[in-house]
Image (cartoon, rainbow, N blue to C red):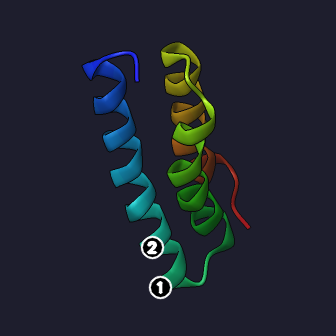
Amino acid sequence: MEGTSQLVWVILFGALGLGFFTYGRKQKAVVPLITGISLFIIPYFISNLYVLVFAGATLVALPYFVKI
């Protein structure tokens, strides 16, 4: 971890991922379920803070635009 800012972003995206995962599982909606799982996983693979924020923000906005 580069610092506290990256840790805060990881915790934020993890909390949002938990919300998306829970919603997708209860509503049987595929897009929020996959988005939640992705938000859990991406911090393990992305070490650059700016790329992490961009990827996380994109994933958070994805269920709003993609309706399946």
Q: Quadrant of the N terminus?
A: top left
The residue pinned by badge 2 equals: 23
Label 1 sits on what residue type? Lys
Q: Categorize mark 1 by other alpha carbons within 10 Å: few (<14), some (14-19), many (20+).
A: few
Q: Secondary structure at mark 2?
A: helix
Label pair 2/1, CB-CB below 8 angstroms: yes
- Up-down relation of residue 47 to residue 45 (above or below): above
Residue drawn at 36 percent across, 31 percent down:
9
Residue 2 in the image, given as x and y percentages of width and height: 39, 16
User: Could you tell me which residue is drawn at 60 percent across and 34 percent down?
Assistant: 58
Front residue of 31/11: it is 11
Q: In x, y percent, where is residue 12?
A: 32, 41
Q: Is residue 10 above or below residue 51?
A: below
68 sits left or right of 55 in the view: right
Check disc 2: other Cα within 10 Å, few if <14, some if 14-19, many if 20+: some
According to the picture, the residue beneath numbered tag 1 turns out to be 26
SS type, badge 1: helix
